[in-house]
Amino acid sequence: MNILFLNSIEKETYGGMEEWIRLAASGLTQRGHSVTAAGRAGSDYLRRMAETSTSVGILELDISGDFNPVTISKLRKFMSVHETDIVVVNFNKDIRLGGLAARWVDGPRVIWSVGLDISKDNLVHRYLTPRLIDGVIVPSQALKRQITRFGYIKTGTVEVIPIGIDDNDFVRPSRKAALDLRRRYGLPKACTVAVTAGRFVEQKGHRYLIEAASAIVKQHPEVIFLFLGDGPLHGKLQSRIADLNLEKHFVLAGMLDNIDSELAGADLMIHPSIEEPFGIVLLEGMRAGLPIVASRVGGIPEVVIEGETATLVEPCNAKQLSEAVHGLLAAPSKMESFGLAGQRRWRAEFRVDTMIDKLEEYLTTLVAQMSHHG
């Protein structure tokens, strides 16, 4: 198959869906499919795609409006020349740009891969979206329920394909990884590292963890909270940490291309999201053998197993969050049990090969159906 992934994410931004595209594109290329990633020229998304696999083609676009005729024309020309079978789109803008180009060529099937509920109940969405897409992929049942609630996306057109991630070279528990992490960030050898990874945006709920930290460090003064990520709320979060006199308990490490070594050396993962359709970082935490404290929202209860691999709390609740973290830190055997169970769950359910199997089967079936009908 000839597959085009179109993602108009802003140049400096890289999130869960961009990581999904990177994994999917790389996996499908290894299976012999021809894959191209299209996005904004100079974007972090395209840079990481190019670094991941020399086999994945790169199509740089000047993306502005949802109906930009120059962008649509360039996409149409690419699809025509490369005989594109499948166009996988991400944002609503991508549905319009990629969908109109594909309909102009009258060949490629358009799949909307949704990582976040961006469906809207207005005339443009109700009229255009069903006419410009041929199928929908979501990572969780929770997100499927969200995007079908308005009725114009039919339940039968939505395929749930959970995200999967690769294995890595780290074996936990690793004393070396733990010592390396503490040395890298200048932390005490005996500290407990609680890691939180995600963009500094409201939906990730960092501020509730900062509020909870005051109570946590009173009982566990050895805890250091390691924030991996960056974003528009950086200044606000830093100010709140200072207001609560918690500077010595927090490390803001910035946005890293790879967080495997940080996770391998940490002791606990905390994921206080307010909204989370899936949560790739939870898979990374389970792969690293980390016990998890997370919010009971969106697709998170489908990824972890409450009481077995993770403790779940209500979102936006600093008190519950602090109690849950204390409950794990006070029970080392429970932490170890959660970590091992998480690793087993990742291996059984969320490996990247499992995801690529399902994705390849879905796309192949769709192309065959369309060819038959055509």
Image: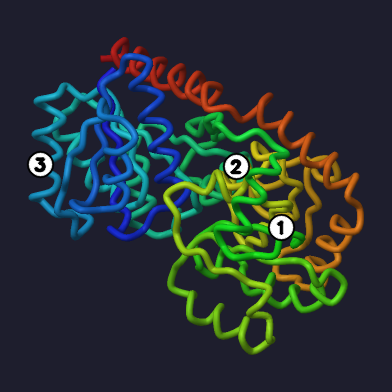
Contact, mark 2 vs mark 3 (Cβ under 8 Å): no
Residue at coordinates 78% horizontally, 66% vertically from top-left? Answer: 321
| Of callouts 3 and 1, the N-terminal one | 3
Q: Which of marks 2 and 1 is in front?
A: 2
- Spatial CA distance of label 2 from label 3 is 37 Å
Q: How crowded is mark 2: few (under 14 residues within 10 Å), some or many (20 or more)?
A: many
In the image, is 322 to the left or to the right of 128?
Answer: right
Q: Is mark 1 on a helix, strand or loop?
A: strand
- Spatial CA distance of label 2 from label 1 is 16 Å
Q: Where is residue 176 in the image (x, y as percent from the top left)?
A: 65, 43
Q: Nearer the viewer, residue 214 or 40?
A: 214
Q: Where is residue 138 in the image (x, y as percent from the top left)?
A: 51, 38
Is residue 264 shown above or below 323?
above
Contact, mark 2 vs mark 1 (Cβ under 8 Å): no
- Spatial CA distance of label 3 from label 1 is 42 Å
Q: Position of residue 28 (x, y in %)?
A: 37, 22
Is residue 350 shown above or below 113?
above
Give the amino acid type for the residue marked by disc 3 in the picture.
Lys
Query: Of the numbered discs in the image, which one, if any, rests on residue 74?
Result: 3
Query: Of the numbered discs in the image, which one, if any, rests on residue 295?
Result: 1
In the image, is 292 to the left or to the right of 241?
Answer: right
Give the amino acid type for the residue marked by disc 2 in the picture.
Glu
- Residue that carries the numbered disc 2 in the rendered image: 284
In the image, is 57 to the left or to the right of 206?
Answer: left
The residue positioned farthest toward the top in the image shown:
372
Is residue 144 shown above or below 371?
below
Residue 95 visible within the image = no
Contact, mark 3 vs mark 1 (Cβ under 8 Å): no
